[in-house]
Image: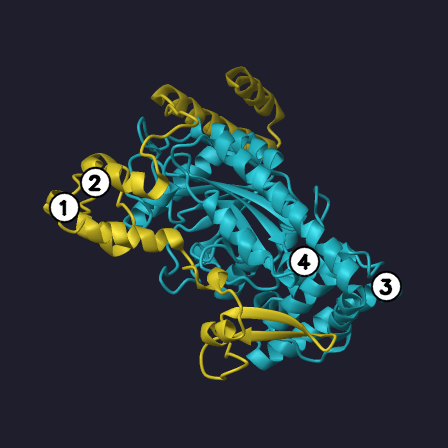
Chain colours: A cyan, B yellow
Amino acid sequence: MDLSLLPDGGMGWLDASGPNSDVVLSTRIRLARNIEGYAFTGRARDGERLRVLAQTRQAVEGVQSLSGAVTYRIDELPPTDRALLHERHLVSKELAGLDPQHPLRSGAAVVLGEHVGLMINEEDHLRLQALRSGFALNEAYADLDRLDRELGARLPYSYHNEFGFLTACPTNVGTGMRASVLIHLPGLNLTKEISRVLTSLQQMGLTYRGLYGEGSEVVGNFLQISNQTTLGRSEEDLLDLLLRVVRHVVAQEEEARRVLLRDAGYIIEDKLWRAYGTLRYARSLTFDEAMKYLSGVRLAVGLKLISGLSVYTLNKLLIFSQAAHLASAEGRPLTESETNLARARYVRKALDEEAGSVG
Amino acid sequence: MICDDCRERDAVVNYTAVKDNNVVQLHLCEQCASERGVETTVSTLPKHPLGEFLNQVQQQLIASPSDGTKCNFCGATMADFRATGRWGCARCYTQFENGIRELLRRVHGHSRHIGHTYRAPQNETLERSAVLGELRERLRRAVDNEQFEQAAELRDRIKGME
């Protein structure tokens, strides 16, 4: 599958160009929308889902926000390609048909433009999403709101005067909006402050998940922080809350990093260089190991203990060291041990290319 | 992943400690972590606090009088909702309105939408968009077939409509 056809290769959000990108990797906002006249995806018949797809594709034609976008019929892709799109965070596990509870649905598709996209026949008929590098909630929402207005003028959304935008799951009804920030918090983990921070997040009406959203584990100190409720507060209020809280978490992470450097400077420096050494020379790496050491090296770059290594390279390693990407690069399916060997090889090569300037 | 201490239970805690000037990282199960005095509240929080909560609410709705009612659009019942946690269609929101209001209050703390309002496009708009779509398709074909005069005319019509 050639993902280079995508407007930014589907990688724009990883380029570390956005604000606070040493702590915040990316900002993602999605809106759940359904189209009038069809049962929700889970209850719809194949024919209905195909009509949802056809009607949406026709509407997308005239949408400026999606000009130049690429459409993939997920239901016509082999499992390896679906896994590739999922690993790149471009489609959800459910849409990719990789979730055992939700087999691949006919009519599943994704439209990928620059900064914005659209999943079709996910849990809701439409999941509009915006993705930005770094901490950029307002910019992402501006893109998404524009797409929503354009699309909503061409498709009749299901909307209720009292309950707002209607969704399959009652946890999404109202604004249908989930805004989330992918954040790296190794400092707060090392200083053992993380429990306290996460507990207070929940008291503020926010929630957190792992790298791959709902149900995914927290690995490598990467978390997604998002609003928990979608009803009874305006989009602007929800965004403002997330903005203020994440700003505070970023400040706390930066403070934790300062404290670590001040109180345990040489221990931290040694630990992080060891992480770099492992990635540079290991011959076999599991996914969890790779994430753990990449987390360490990312922290070292943020603390300026390691220079000459770009955050973009590290972000790319997060994506390209995953199983489907490795299998795709090797051009064949890999067993688990082959995957671990291929991962170590890939990481070594990527770090080797920048090794001359690392110090 | 198995707990590094007991080697029996699944590890749920990533434990990092400084020991003799070495940073050690252990994967521990909840019991072993708490034996080491680690606060495990974070890892033991349910993965979907909302999902669990929803379950409880759904349990309470079991005896709801609307249980036998079927949605007149998609045929879904409250039993379907309890099994899947999902409504069948937009109409279900009206069909099961009373139960839903209470459910939403428990889930969101509110039952009324505050935020962007929406009006579905009128048929005229949809028709216009369909006509525009067709004109664009004809324009593409005209350009492909190098029928430039026709293409120019189509382009003007599209511009006029936009």
Q: Mark 4 and 3 residues: CB-CB less than 8 Å, in contact?
A: no
Residue A358 marker: 3
Of the residues shown, which amino acid type is indicated by label 3? Val
Mark 3: secondary structure: loop
**Could you say where residue A336 lies in the image, as x and y percent from the top left?**
56, 78
Kind of element beneath mark 1: loop
Q: Residues within 10 Å of mark 4 (few under 14, many from 20)?
A: many
Disc 1 and disc 3 in contact, CB within 8 angstroms: no
Same-chain status of marks 1 and 4 = no
The answer to whether one can see residue A8 in this image is no
To which chain does the residue with label 1 belong? Answer: B
- Give yes or no for contact between labels 2 and 3 (Cβ–Cβ under 8 Å): no
Q: Nearest the camera: A80 or B83?
A: B83
Q: Which mark is residue A158?
A: none
Residue contact between numbered discs 2 and 1, judged by CB atoms under 8 Å: yes
* Dot in front, 1 or 4: 4
At label 1, which amino acid type do we have?
A: Ser
Horizontal relation, residue B162 to residue B127: left or right: right
Host chain of mark 2: B
Tell me the SS state at disc 4. helix
Q: Is there any visible trace of residue B44 in the rendered image?
A: yes
Residue A119 vs A153, above or below: the answer is below
Q: Amino acid at mark 4?
A: Gly
Q: Residue visible at 51% across and 64% down?
A: B39
- Judged left or right of residue A354, residue A336 is left
Q: Amino acid at mark 2?
A: Gly
Q: CA distance from mark 1 to mark 4?
A: 49 Å
Disc 1 versus disc 3: distance between alpha carbons? Answer: 66 Å
Give the residue pinned by disc 1.
Answer: B64
Residue A99, percent from left and from top: 41, 62
Which mark sits nearer the N-terminus, 2 or 1? 1
Residue B99: give its label: 2
